[in-house]
Amino acid sequence: MSACDQHQLAAWPMPRTCPYAPPDAYRDLREDAPTRVRIRGGDAWLVTRHADVRRALNDNRFSADDQQPGFPLRIQLPPEPGVMSFSRMDDPEHGRLRRMALTEFTARRTRALRPEVELLVDHLLDELERRPRPVDLVTEFAVRLPALVIARMLGVPERDEADFTEQSRVVLSQEAGPEETYAAFVTMTRLLDRLVTERTADPRDDLVSRLATRYVASGELTHDELVAMARFFLVAGHETTAHQIALSVLSLLRDPGQQAELRADPSLFKPAVEELLRYWSISQDNQVRVAVDDIELGGAHIRKGEGVVLAIPAANHDESVYPGAERLDIHRDAAGHLAFGFGPHLCPGASLARMELEVCLSRLFARFPALRLAVPVEDVRFRENTLVYGLEELPVTW
């Protein structure tokens, strides 16, 4: 492709014109086959249809390995021991590590964890009630709950919780430069390296201890692999859930009718969570792959070595699958949404995230039925330049 041709390509990531909807360009692009877009350092294919994104996520000819030639990373991190995550691996290594990780995220474990999550939520709501109003629901509730849950699951000491939260924020920011991003990776890795060392020597009742006892001791998992796995859980389990909670609360504050329905019939919270996940699709720019073979996808011929961006927000707003997709509807059957991915890289913590969201929303609106925004809705500030969409703050009162 010539420099002139590349200059004419649309740039990605694409800007939103409305903070409550994916970029307008996605709507038009879904009418066509996957299209070429300009990214930092080159160009890649952008896939926007639900069927095409779903197929690509389940096709092993699209590699998640960011060390493959042509992988569309805008920030390239040097590979070092303990830094690589199994989310950026292909089978068979990915499958081997994922099977071990899934032992900690079964439906049974999630159900067993629910009473503790309920207690944590109630404790945070007690604190919220004592604070002077207005309060920022992002910093005082939405960020704290998943951080506490995943930190307690991993066995992270309280002294390290603030450090982990900050490093996670930097890693997922699109505004941080390569040096800052890499430094955050290294800092987080060192903290987790220390945790794995401590729990291997002195196991306790936590996720890291169980994986160390079961798999590191047997030689099935290395120390560095457990460090990388724990870091993946921390970043994925904290940042995404925090901002999904905040955005979900904002949605219901903007829609008193649907909020009232949920309060009147709490059984609706479970399907409402699925619709909120579909509607926001907060993992907006981080599903990227590279073709390791020539592939026909949705009418496009993608050659080996070409990068591919899988637009989850575009797929989850595909009108052919979800009519009226840009309208939040808690009665919609949102089954099949791709908010957690699909196929071999389906988020292992999906059931945990669903449970946290259901508990948070149901208990928050039961405790504070008069909850409302403390600022005009147009003054709510969104996080624009991040891999995970969200809110800077959510001032509320009651």
Image (cartoon, rainbow, N blue to C red):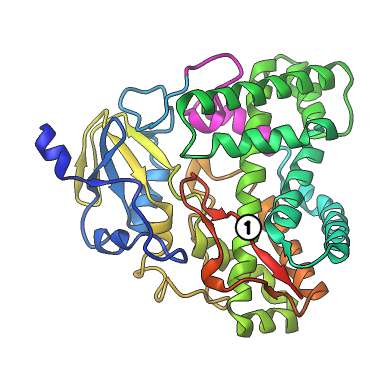
Residue 274 horizontal side relative to residue 37, left or right: right
Question: Can you see residue 1?
Answer: no
Image quadrant holding the N terminus, namely top left
Above/below status of 354 relative to 306 = below
Relative image position of residue 315 (x, y in whole percent):
39, 58
Q: Residue 45's quadrant in the figure?
A: top left
| Residue 126 image position (x, y, % from top left) | 88, 62
- The residue depicted at 49 percent of the width and 48 percent of the height is 342
Residue 96 forms part of the magenta stretch: yes
Whether residue 315 can be seen here: yes
Q: How many marks?
A: 1
Is residue 308 rendered magenta in the image? no
Residue plotted at (82% across, 50% down): 113
Quadrant assignment, res 230:
top right
Q: Does 224 appear above or below 391? A: above
Residue type indicated by callout 1: Glu
Percent position of residue 369, x then y: 77, 79
Quadrant for the C terminus, please: bottom right
Q: Name the residue: 67% across, 44% down.
A: 238
Residue at 40 percent of width and 76 percent of height: 324
**Callout 1: 10 Å neighbours few (<14), some, many (20+)?**
some
Write down the region rendered in magenta: 78-102
Pick the front one: 292 or 12: 12
Q: Which residue is mark 1?
A: 393
**Spot occupied by residue 254 in the image (x, y as percentages of width and height):** 58, 76
User: Relative to 131, is 186 on the left or the right?
Assistant: left
Q: Choose between 87 and 172: the one closer to the eye.
A: 172
